[in-house]
Image (cartoon, rainbow, N blue to C red):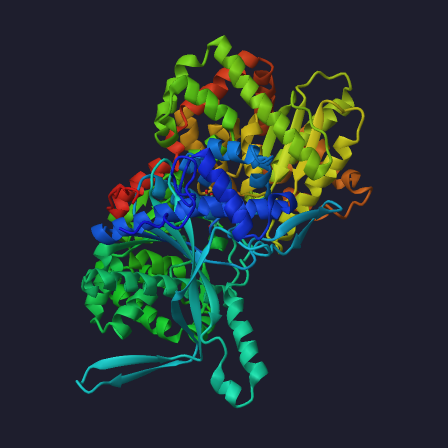
Amino acid sequence: MTKHNNTTKPGGNGESIRTGMSEEAIRLAFLDNLFYVQGRFLEVASLDDKYKALAYTVRDRLLHRWVSTIRTYQQANPRTVCYLSAEYLPGPFMGLNLLNMGIEEPTRKALQSLGIDLESLIAYEQEPGLGNGGLGRLAACFMDSLATLQIPATSYGIRYEFGIFQQDIRNGEQVETTDNWLHYGNPWEVRRPQISYDVKIGGHTEHYTNEQGLHRVRWVPHETFRGVAIDTPILGHDVNTVNLMRLWRAEAAEALDFHAFNEGDYYGAVLREVRSETISKVLYPNDAPEIGKRLRLLQQHFFVTCSLQDMMRVHRTTGMPIERFHEKFTVQLNDTHPAIAVAELMRLLLDNHHLDWDTAWHVTRHTFAYTNHTLLPEALEKWPIPLFQSLLPRHLEIIYEINSRFLDEVRQRYPFDPDRAQRLSIIDETLPRHVRMAHLACIGSFAINGVAELHSQLLKETVLRDFYELWPEKFQNKTNGVTPRRFMLLSNPGLGSLLNETLGHGWETDLEQLRGLEAHADDPAFQERWRQVKRQRKEALAGEVHKLCGIDITPTSLYDVQVKRIHEYKRQHLNLLHIITLYNRIKRNPALDIVPRTFIFGGKSAPGYAMAKLIIRLINAVAEMVNRDRDVAGRLKVVFLPNFSVKLGQWVYPAADISQQISTAGKEASGTGNMKFSMNGALTIGTLDGANVEIREDVGAENFFLFGLDADAVSHTLANGYRPWDYYNANQELKDVIDLIASGFFAHGDRSLFQPLVDHLLQHDSYLLLADYADYIACQDQVSAAYRDPQRWTRMSILNVARIGKFSSDRTIAEYCRDIWKVQPVPVKLD
Ligand code: Z16
């Protein structure tokens, strides 16, 4: 074994400065990196220099573990999970890597001795915003848990040059600006120019018979690009396992097209190079409704083919025959974004490895498993056939063949039910014809799962009902979870210390141990410390709010928080109806004794989603009127936090008293913010939707503020001719609120600005705000009553944390490993 520490100066106790974990080794390494990587000495170093020097210091220690991990995997040749996701939202790396490696304290001290504040370096990091919301963040929690559980796993995706847009609020409106996250360089990634693959697009196919008389297919593409691997190490907590996030960057097939160059088309060659790079240029900022864009399909094909070719390269090194590909790899499809993988793996096996159809199909069907994340019909991906044909002609042929064989099977199973084949077909035959990606995913996968019990149940009853009837054994539930390392330990160090003192270590990787808190729920001294932790996080958030919005909020007020993508089904405007109701109550009765509240919103709208953008405007308009009104001062405050992100979330979740999870029942697949709040002692006001149902079951109905119609009642209400007007006319407070919005009160007298929103509520209200309004208001009144009793409130808060153990992503990942992936931990020893 090579020793790579001979060439470097030893630290104080003989440790290598590249890998040593002591304060002294870290200080020397930091100075070394500052000098030799950044070319700076301390006195003139900028914040960026210091951040980079520390990042490289941490990275050396990560790579040390990474090398040991790769060596271990090479020797053991274990079955490996490949997670395919078009989105990842890992959040800033510095704090978490220090924490997971257990060197936060020596690092803090080492920097302190140089007059540098660790927190300021952590705060400086710009996170990779390579995702829209829940789905991308879930993928990041899964990476954290896979590494922590010591599971061999690679996460494949796209290295977007521009991630999710930065959101500015100007005149109350969302304004998008580009996210140039790579501008100052990214110290956490390693580019692997040798790991790159060809990506073909367009053109046509040629069928022919070879010299042995065998049928062969050649895809003659219109263009060829390359995907180059860019790797980021993902460290587990308290283990040596470092897994890989491998993202693909599009580049030109050759640096310059010398053929064209020789013909004098220098500019043409350069432009082709620029064009190829557009594939991985930018993330599509839509969280639910899919937009049938050519470049988006290209992105999907691009990262899928690179990932599968990469797996095949690794597979070759094992010496196993290609027919056993599915024994080495299990591939999870994160939604339908990578579903083209079913056709692509078939193509590689048929056209490159020359397997016969049945063998190739056997391998494919045993390789993939598919996770569905939505029930919204408008969010199910479909591609117009002409578009598909023009980009992926060979894939379309393969899809037709898969479909034809599949439909033969269906007709045989249901000889008297011709409609069923139509419904199950991969091709939607209603004009214009489309490829249905969810159908391709279901047919090509051995397992299909939803992300919460209710969601998995509704999948079987609605969007995937025919597939469930055909293959009930394929369907599973895997309730989402989130990582307690980032969302408790790192975001809420005060809570972490209190838990360590009370329960000892162990809960961080075995969250059910939090049950031990139940015994302290009524202890007045413990309750007092619990409140101090919350109070401290509320003060910290107040500081951030002041920095970001210039608004002063009061830590003694109830922090009532809703942070998530802006969407009509998530009903941020129902929250607003409550705020305006309280406002009206105070205006009517200025002496009213109410619990002072600070309402905090955050979240981005898809740039083309007009109603969501109007909701943002209304939030800011209400904030403006409420915050400057002396009659309500000290009792109501409204804040819209711009540019919500993982980083900002780390300030927000620990500071919340109330977590708003108020989607129309049956619409939110799971939700994961709900779990992050609960883990930090916020109480939930919520509907029976997504994972709320299970959170309530576990924390106890008496510790959860439930309101609203359930999913059954929602579908009945909508099916039986719902009339929002009737609710408006029957409820004076509701009428007053709607009338006030319609009057232009929040728009400097302009009645037209919010009219589309008011009209939609009164005429359609497809998300049933008016039907749920009265119950929501009554429930919020219960919240206030509970908050007036600190002992009761604190007890409820403690019990929420004590009983939230199930919602660790460690539990989720352990279930995927056991029920779907059939993989085992492979511990790693440091070389
Ligand atoms: C997304 O974030 C989700 C669903 C989807 O179809 C597309 C995107 Cl980008 C979310 C769900 O809305 C949410 O309920 C769920 O918790 C999350 O995915 C993770 O499963």
User: From where the camera sits, is residue 689 visible?
Assistant: no
In the current view of this chain or complex, which residue is farthest to the top? 524
Location of residue 438 with respect to 216 vertically, above or below: above
Location of residue 315 with respect to 594 vertically, above or below: below
Q: Position of residue 468 (x, y in %)?
A: 30, 50
Q: Quadrant of residue 21?
A: top left
Q: Quadrant of residue 422?
A: bottom left
Location of residue 92 with respect to 700 vertically, above or below: below
Residue at figure coordinates x 55%, y 49% from the top left: 35
Residue at figure coordinates x 40%, y 31% from the top left: 694
Residue at figure coordinates x 22%, y 52% from the top left: 75
Q: In this view of the protein, which residue sits in the foreground, 791 or 197? A: 197
Q: Position of residue 559 (x, y in %)?
A: 61, 27
Residue at figure coordinates x 33%, y 41% from the top left: 240
Q: Position of residue 263 (x, y in %)?
A: 52, 90
Q: Position of residue 517 (x, y in %)?
A: 41, 18
Q: In this view of the protein, which residue sits in the foreground, 756 or 345? A: 345
Q: Is residue 568 left or right of residue 139?
A: right
In the current view of this chain or complex, which residue is farthest to the bottom? 263
Q: Quadrant of the C terminus?
A: top left
Q: In this view of the protein, which residue sits in the foreground, 66 or 779? A: 66
Circle count: 0
Q: Is residue 543 left or right of residue 227?
A: right
User: From where the camera sits, is residue 60 visible?
Assistant: yes
